[in-house]
Image (cartoon, rainbow, N blue to C red):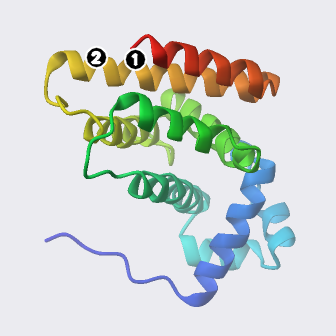
Amino acid sequence: MPTTKPVPSAREQELLERAYAYSLTHGLADLSLRPLAAAIGSSPRVLLFLFGSKDGLIRALLARARGDELELLKSLRYDDRPGLEVVAKELWTWLAAPERRPLMNLWVEAYGRSLVAPDGPWADYARSTVEDWLELLKASQPDGESKDAQARRTAVLALLRGALLDLLATGDLDRTTRAVEQQLKTR
């Protein structure tokens, strides 16, 4: 029988939101509970009580970050299947927006950690985000079930991820946007 986690208390939710804001600025890789607790108006003991462990807190923060991504994916669902290019352009606009840089930096950190520490709190993060994005892209394709459609959406996802990494490394929005748009025209 599966167990369900109880609904978080208002205090737990408040501290999670504060910790999430902190992690967007400071990252998660070197997260230390003392500085985090001091910055968000709590104590390490309270955080451990609410989240069970540092790993539990990291899992909660990753779930919170993934929640932001899933909200985007829900907002981009289409009934008329506008095509891969249209949806990919909208995704790029969302990903590349300057106000999303902290979230995208956190995403890159979590994605990378998920690959090198697959058994820790990062477990499955990379795979889950790939599946989420591929599902959205599939929903945009009239022929989404075919092997060719699967290959096209995989290529588009690789293009978006590569351009995002380049954008985060260089800050060159114009160049990366032109590259994405040029590549999408050839699909």
Q: Which residue is mark 2?
A: 151
What residue is at 65 percent from the left and 41 percent from the top?
104
Residue 179 percent location from the top left of the image:
62, 15
Q: Residue at x 52, y 33 (%)?
A: 89
Q: Nearer the viewer, residue 21 or 132?
A: 132
* Inter-mark Cα distance, 1 to 2: 6 Å
Q: Indicate left or right for 10 with 33 as reference.
A: left
Looking at the image, which residue is at 67% across and 37% down? Answer: 96
Which residue type carries mark 2?
Ala
Q: In x, y percent, where is residue 57?
A: 59, 62
Residue 118, x across and y down, in percent:
45, 34
* Above or below for 148 versus 126: above
Checking the image for residue 155, the label placed there is 1
In the image, residue 186 sits, relative to residue 124, either above or below, namely above
Q: For the residue carrying disc 2, how many other residues have a C-alpha within 10 Å: few (<14), some (14-19), or many (20+)? A: few
Q: Secondary structure at mark 1?
A: helix
